[in-house]
Amino acid sequence: MSNEKKVAIIGVGNIGTAIATNTVKGNRPVILASRKLEDAEALSNKLGDLATAAEIPDAINQADIVVVAVWFNSIQEVFTTYKKELEGKIIIDPSNAIAVDDKGNVTKTIPDNESAGQINAQNLPKNAVLVKAMGSLSAHSLATASFQQPNEAVLFYATDNTDIDTDVEKFIHDNGYEALRVGKLDQSRRIEVLGDLNEFSIKKTVDLDEAKTKI
């Protein structure tokens, strides 16, 4: 376990909570942070000894992999506020640039030919690497479809840097999912909401064999 990349999760909403819970279930330590430290502490206490809470800059400094589990329109603020701390980190971005009206209709808040991943990568801290991952499933599915047997469900990911694939795939595996790379960040819109590889389009979770037929 000492050779594993240390993981911090910034944000303990539905997505952050699901990822933190799965990470602990996969027997991997996690550092939790939120704008309100007490929220991170509450989740840490609930998850047990493998979860600890810290202020955001301290959590980032302790980690190699940082999951920025906040709304799409808040990510650039995180990048700017914690620019120094995020230098050289592997940043996992599960965000989706969407809006939901009072009838439940989902629309993109960016042009159809753009992706949250590519937009967020434009303002990365120095030497940081962005990975679009953990957002191809809804928060509910992310929480309930992990560690499926006999075949794990797939979480797609995209990144421009193949050198970190092993670290990313190990983290996804420790969350109870099979990892499948779809390509570079120019393919990330495929795994975001309304993309053809997102759960909302496929209408279900898929195992590795099913997922490979859709790439």
Image: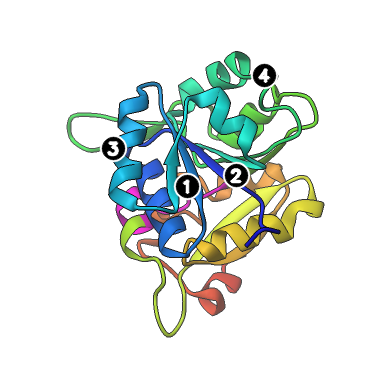
Q: Nearer the viewer, mark 2 or mark 4?
A: 4
Q: Nearer the viewer, mark 3 or mark 4?
A: 3
The answer to whether one can see residue 115 in this image is no
Mark before the other along the chain sequence, 2 or 3: 3
Is disc 2 surrounded by few (<14), some (14 to 19) or many (20+) residues within 10 Å? many
Q: Label 1's element?
A: loop
Contact between marks 1 and 2 (CB within 8 A): the answer is: yes
Give the CA distance from mark 3 to mark 1: 24 Å
The residue beneath circle 1 is 135
The residue beneath circle 2 is 132
Residue segment shown in magenta = 133-142
Q: Is residue 92 above or below residue 169?
A: above
Horizontal side of 73 relative to 89 (left or right) equals left
Contact between marks 3 and 4 (CB within 8 A): the answer is: no
Give the CA distance from mark 3 to mark 4: 27 Å
The answer to whether one can see residue 149 in this image is yes
Q: Is residue 200 magenta?
A: no
Give the CA distance from mark 2 to mark 4: 19 Å
Q: Is residue 202 above or below residue 34?
A: below
- Residue at x 47%, y 25% (from the top left corner): 55
